Image: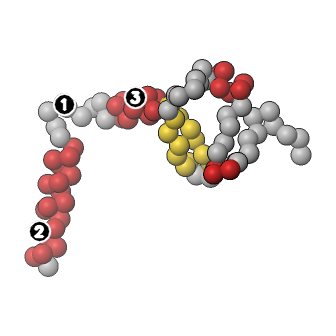
């Protein structure tokens, strides 16, 4: 099997070095913060800013005067109340 130019190895303490060509293409610099997440059987590294933008876009339809936290708390309290009545 031929080795890919972007193949990486997991080193000591789980460290992974991002190949220079990818760092350059993605304009990654020392100190940049990335968020790691599992997607299926893949590991995805994403800039924190990109993740924040994606989340803001996902929830942009929610009016600014709506608190999702307050709604979640109210839902949980109502659910707990229903459980107590059973």
Residue named by callout 3: 53
- Image coordinates of residue 35 in percent, x first then y, are 50, 39
Task: Answer whether labels 2 and 3 touch (C-beta < 8 Å).
Answer: no
Q: Residue furthest bottom?
A: 86
Residue at (57% x, 41% y) in the render: 44
- Could you say which is closer to the camera, residue 69 or residue 16? 16
Residue at the image point whose x is 16% and y is 37% from the top: 66
User: Looking at the rendering, which quadrant does residue 25 occupy?
Assistant: top right
Compared to 36, does 52 lie above or below?
Answer: above
Task: Please give the residue where the numbered disc 1 appears in the rendered image.
Answer: 64
In terms of depth relative to the viewer, which is nearer, 4 or 31?
31
* Rendered-image quadrant of the C terminus: bottom left
Residue closest to the eye, 67 or 85: 67
In the rendered view, how is the structure colored? Answer: secondary structure
Separation of residues labelled 1 and 3 (CA atoms):
16 Å
Q: Tell which of 6 and 78 is nearer to you.
A: 6
Residue that badge 2 annotates:
81
Q: Earlier in the sequence, mark 1 or mark 3?
A: 3
The residue tagged with tag 2: helix, strand or loop? helix
Toward the front, the furthest residue is: 12
Of badges 2 and 3, nearer the viewer stands: 3
Asked whether, in this view, residue 35 is left or right of residue 82, the answer is right
Measured in 3D between alpha carbons, the distance from the residue under mark 1 to the one under mark 2, in whole angstroms, is 28 Å
């Amino acid at each position: 099997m031929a080795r890919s130019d972007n193949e990486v190895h997991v080193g000591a303490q789980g460290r992974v070095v991002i190949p220079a060509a990818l760092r350059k293409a993605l304009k990654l610099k020392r100190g940049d913060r990335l968020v790691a997440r599992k997607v299926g059987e893949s590991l995805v590294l994403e800039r924190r800013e990109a993740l924040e933008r994606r989340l803001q876009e996902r929830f942009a339809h929610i009016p600014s005067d709506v608190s999702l936290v307050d709604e979640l708390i109210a839902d949980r309290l109502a659910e707990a109340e229903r459980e107590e009545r059973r």
